[in-house]
Image: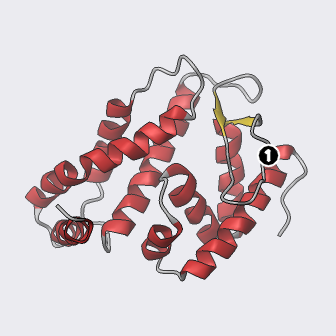
Amino acid sequence: MTLPDFRSEVTRLVSACVDGNDLAFDELFSVVYDDLRAVAHRQLRKEAQGHTLHTTALVHEAYLNLVDQTHSGWRDRAHFFAIASTAMRHILIDYARRRGARKRGGIQIQVPLRDNIAVVDSDSSVELLELDDALNALSVQNPRMARIVECRFFGGMTVQETAEALDASVRTVEREWTRAKAHLYLALRGDGVTR
């Protein structure tokens, strides 16, 4: 299936889910399964050695979260993947909490918050829970910037896909992605968050 055909098929299935077709979600999941596995794999690759949650388990837990939202107004393929990215983020956060991660020395992930802009040294790492706290604080101040981070960092989405998912311009996503990275960098470094 070509990329335009794939996008059209996913958008068609998303629309069918929103319209109440209960069988469409299972079909949608089978069509996007490999893409969701790629997103999950990227996320788990950032986890510390010894992490026991595997790609398949993360995708299946996301499926269970998403199946409860089949009538939640997904607009299209990009929006669906943005929601899936958020679901995976929450699963990883819940997993870290269940594992008893502490503020210092718990489960850590590498946070390469860069996209042609060096924001974090390549050897830097922060705890997943600290990143979640910083992202939650950002979402209070600027919900769209927080969603951009979820799409780009947790979902591995491109700037174009993020713009489509959030119904924003590419330039707005680029600008707010840069601001969000700086914002999170300051928060994670302990310097506080500036506007």
Per the image, label 1 sits on a secondary structure element best described as: helix
Classify 137 as above or below 105: below
The percent coordinates of residue 63 (x first, y second) are 29, 45
Label 1 crowd (10 A; few <14 / some 14-19 / many >=20): many
> Quick check: 151 left or right of 104?
left
Q: Is residue 32 left or right of residue 84?
A: left
> On the picture, is 82 further left or further right than 67?
right
Provide residue 175's location: percent of width, then percent of height.
Answer: 68, 75
Point 21% across, 51% down: residue: 29
User: Which residue is the site of mark 1?
Assistant: 188
Closest to the observer, 16 or 44:
44
Q: Quadrant of the N terminus?
A: bottom left
Q: Residue furthest right?
A: 191
Figure coloring: secondary structure
Foreground of the two, 133 or 145: 145
Q: How many marks?
A: 1
In this rendering, the answer to whether 47 lies above or below 24 is above
Quadrant holding the C terminus = bottom right
Vertical relation: 51 (above or below) 37: above
Image quarter of residue 110: top right
Q: Amino acid at mark 1?
A: Leu
* Residue 115: % across, % down: 66, 58
Residue 145 coordinates in the image, percent (x, y)? 64, 67
Q: Residue at x 57, y 35 (%)?
A: 46
Write the residue at 49% across / 53% down.
156
Q: Nearer the viewer, residue 113 or 26?
A: 113
